[in-house]
Amino acid sequence: MSNRQTASGVTVAVAKGRILDDARRRLEAAGWVWPLGEESRQLWVGPDDTHPGIIIARAKDVATLVARGIADLGIVGLDVMRENPDAEVLEVADLEFAQCRVVLAGRSPAWPDGPCQIATKYQRIARQFFQEREHPISIVPMSGSLELAPLIGLAPYIVDIVDTGRTLREHGLVEVTTILHSSARLIANPSHWRTKSEVVAFRESLRSAAS
Ligand code: ATP
Ligand code: PRP
């Protein structure tokens, strides 16, 4: 099936932020037009022969849109999927961009000595990680600037994303251990995946553009 035949039936929800630029590049590498301008504030555009429909959404909402069939496919980080696992979606490809790790970090690389406080926006991932190790913790919810927490005495440890390690270093923090390796995933609505051949063909176009 050629690209021109496949685009018209497919809508893709893409997470805002870092994922968006790489997703645009991958679509273009696969031969699709990216239908939103660089500075555009537009959040939705319908499909045509040259591109799929695109919905730009908050990362947490991408799986909801896909589970409800508003979008056939979604592009979102594995970290977000693991933190918000309730939506019924299929993971159909590892797109291999937005690579990063969710780590436990603190002022020293030592494992926490006894019960401790963890500042994080990954509350579920952190709770599950420590529960599996039967280590008591309490969560201090924070939605950004996590690296501040140990410096200002809010919590001695954080669970956050690391890529180059620069942000940790600049705040005098070190990794204790990696909890999760993450990258952008292509997710699909289960029923559309089974019944719409153009959705599967679209996945193939993105996969072959990676090599
Ligand atoms: P939101 O505000 O909607 O929660 P966010 O601001 O956390 O999103 P981004 O920082 O743009 O989102 O990150 C989007 C995704 O990119 C993350 O879910 C993760 O998978 C990945 N990511 C985050 N930080 C990095 C990084 N430094 N290097 C590589 N990938 C990253
Ligand atoms: C992410 C993450 C770290 C940083 C890690 O923050 O929360 O702070 O990247 O990357 P590094 O290891 O390469 O330094 P981001 O810049 O996305 O800001 P935000 O979390 O406040 O959105």
Image: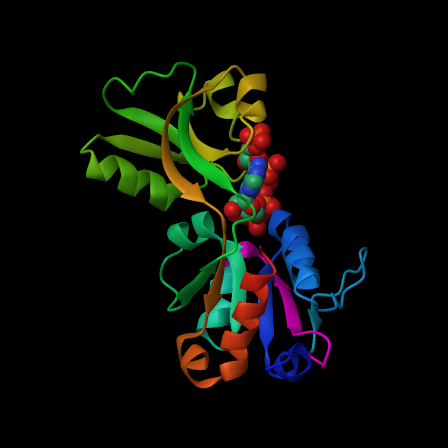
- Which residue is at the front of the view, 38 or 150? 38
Q: Does the magenta run of residues contain 53? A: yes
Residue at 28%, 38% (x, y): give it: 129
In which image quadrant can residue 9 be found? bottom right
Residue 31 screen position, x and y as percent: 70, 67
Asked whether, in this view, residue 119 is left or right of residue 23, the answer is: left
Residue 204 screen position, x and y as percent: 53, 69
Identify the image quadrant of the N terminus.
bottom right
Residue 154 screen position, x and y as percent: 45, 23
Residue 95 screen position, x and y as percent: 52, 55
Say if residue 152 shows up in the picture.
no
In which image quadrant can residue 11 be found? bottom right
- Which residue is at the front of the view, 210 or 10? 210
Please say if 162 is above or below 41.
above
Residue at 45%, 45% (x, y): give it: 182
Identify the image quadrant of the C terminus.
bottom right
Asked whether, in this view, residue 156 is left or right of residue 18, the answer is: left
The magenta segment is 47-60
Q: Does the magenta run of residues contain 194? A: no
Please say if 150 is above or below 97.
above
Say if residue 197 shows up in the picture.
yes
Ligand number 1: quarter of image? top right
Please say if 42 is above or below 211.
below
